[in-house]
Image (cartoon, helix red, strand yellow):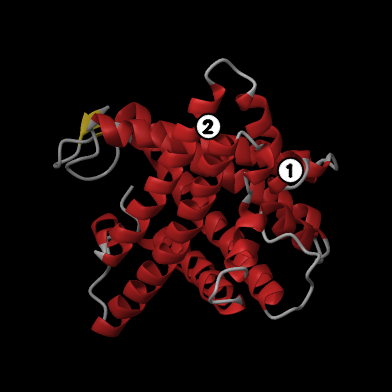
Amino acid sequence: MQSTSGGTPVQDGAPRTGIVVAARVGLATRGVLYVLVGAIALRIAFGEDPGRQADRQGALAGLAGAPLGRVMIWAVGIGLVGMTLWRLSEAVFGGAGPDGKKAGKRLAGAFRAVFYAVAAVSVFAFAAGQGGGGSGDEQSRDATASVLEWPGGRWLVALAGLGVAVGGVVIAVSALRRKFRDDLALPSWPGWVRGVVDVLGIGGGLARGALFAAAGGCAFYAAVEYDPDKAKGVDDTLRAFAGTPAGPWLLVAVAAGLVLFGLFSWAAAAWQRV
């Protein structure tokens, strides 16, 4: 193992190449899921297919109905394993860039690795015909109900919800500030290409941030009310946007933003600094 010019430790040879491949495959997979979830949410906003789940489970169900659907679902699971390994490498070895070795970056990598590992297990369960553990909304309510029963569980749920909500705000602000540019090694292409990437990154980041902030806010409210039914998964959170004074048009905006984030993830798959 040796250091890059920026001082971030990396693995040489095959392990390093494997992490790069895992990151790019993982980012591409993330893009597929966001595009599918955003597309489902758009259909719901326009009154089409209202019974479909606008979350990972709904996206997998859509893939299952396509030709070679089962193969594609296994591929999604493998892609999420790639994301897990990449984020785990960031936690252990540090990430790209001058700040990659900082404790905050490593901790974020560890949390992301756990998140994607859980997601991968859920996808593999779905591929194996076990249903992936129910809808995201049910999983959120069940998990919240379980934690609320722990000693101090109410505080844990409140802190977790607050953390997710704050994280959503940070994601949105970072998108507006175009911080994603720091993580991309864009080639010397015409300015309009960079402009397109900016549109995808800003629009996608704002929508993703809004989704996280709303979901975290619901978890915090569930803790305050001591009612796990107040917690929401991705599907319920997205539908809640349609219940605001802005009506279904806010859901349209967020759903379209999720599609943009999916497209941005594909761009990142090509240009992300790993």
Residue 44 drawn at (x, y percent):
71, 72
Residue at the disc numbered 2 = 157
Upstream in sequence: badge 2 or badge 1: 1
Furthest residue in direction top, as rendered: 151
**On screen, residue 200 above or below 23:** below
Q: Residue at x 66, y 37 (%)?
A: 228
Q: Residues within 10 Å of mark 1 (few under 14, many from 20)?
A: some
Quadrant, the N terminus:
top left
**On screen, residue 68 above or below 50:** above
Q: Residue at x 59, y 40 (%)?
A: 222
Q: Residue at x 85, y 43 (%)?
A: 129
Q: Nearer the viewer, residue 262 or 22?
A: 262
**On screen, residue 44 above or below 101:** below
Residue 186 drawn at (x, y percent):
28, 67
**On screen, residue 59 above or below 85:** below
Count of marks, rendered view: 2
The kind of residue on which mark 1 rests is Glu
Q: Residues within 10 Å of mark 2 (few under 14, many from 20)?
A: many
126 relative position to 246: left or right: right
Asked if residue 4 can be seen in this view, the reply is: yes
The kind of residue on which mark 2 rests is Val
Q: Nearer the viewer, residue 161 or 57?
A: 161
Q: Which circle marks residue 138 in the picture?
A: 1
Discs 2/1, front = 2
Residue 214 drawn at (x, y percent):
50, 54
Q: Quadrant of residue 37?
A: bottom right
